[in-house]
Amino acid sequence: MKHHLITIIAASLLAGCATQSFVISGNTDEGPTEQTSQAFFVSGIGQSRMLDAAAICGGPAKVLKVETQETFLNGLLGVITMGIYTPRNAKVYCSK
């Protein structure tokens, strides 16, 4: 049991965070307009999630940036569930 715990701790420490940002236009210094968590299963193999940034911002001209992120907690959940459940965060930044 001790070896399993050490393996889980080592794997969670090695799990890195990842962020993909798509800057459309403008200044994105303010916080996100919308933030949501998206659930993937079996490491997300063959899965995709759609987020309509234009609908969230009230038109495509108001979209400043779209970002997806895997945080340390997301990676830890993936390690604990052995890849069965792997969440990601999505953020949309809109102009005022």
Image (tube, rainbow, N blue to C red):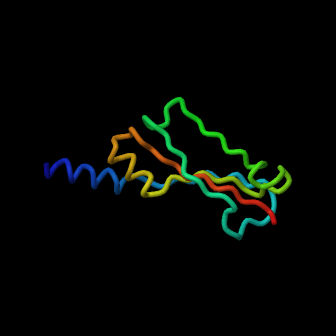
Residue 53 x/y as whole percent: 73, 49
Which residue is depicted at the point 72% across and 59% down? Answer: 93
Q: Residue furthest top?
A: 46
Which residue is depicted at the point 50% across and 44% down? Answer: 39
Residue 90 x/y as whole percent: 60, 52
Q: Which one is in front, 59 or 11?
A: 59
Tally the marks: 0
Which residue is depicted at the point 61% across and 57% down? Answer: 35
Q: Residue furthest left?
A: 1
**Quadrant showing the C terminus:** bottom right
**Image side of residue 73 versus residue 2, left or right:** right
Q: Which one is in front, 13 or 89?
A: 89
Q: Is residue 42 above or below residue 57?
A: above
Which residue is depicted at the point 34% across and 57% down? Answer: 13
**Image side of residue 34 versus residue 27, left or right:** left
Q: Is residue 70 above or below residue 86?
A: below
Residue 47 x/y as whole percent: 55, 33
Q: Which one is in front, 21 or 83?
A: 83
Residue 46 x/y as whole percent: 53, 29
Q: Residue furthest right?
A: 61
**Image side of residue 12 versus residue 96, left or right:** left
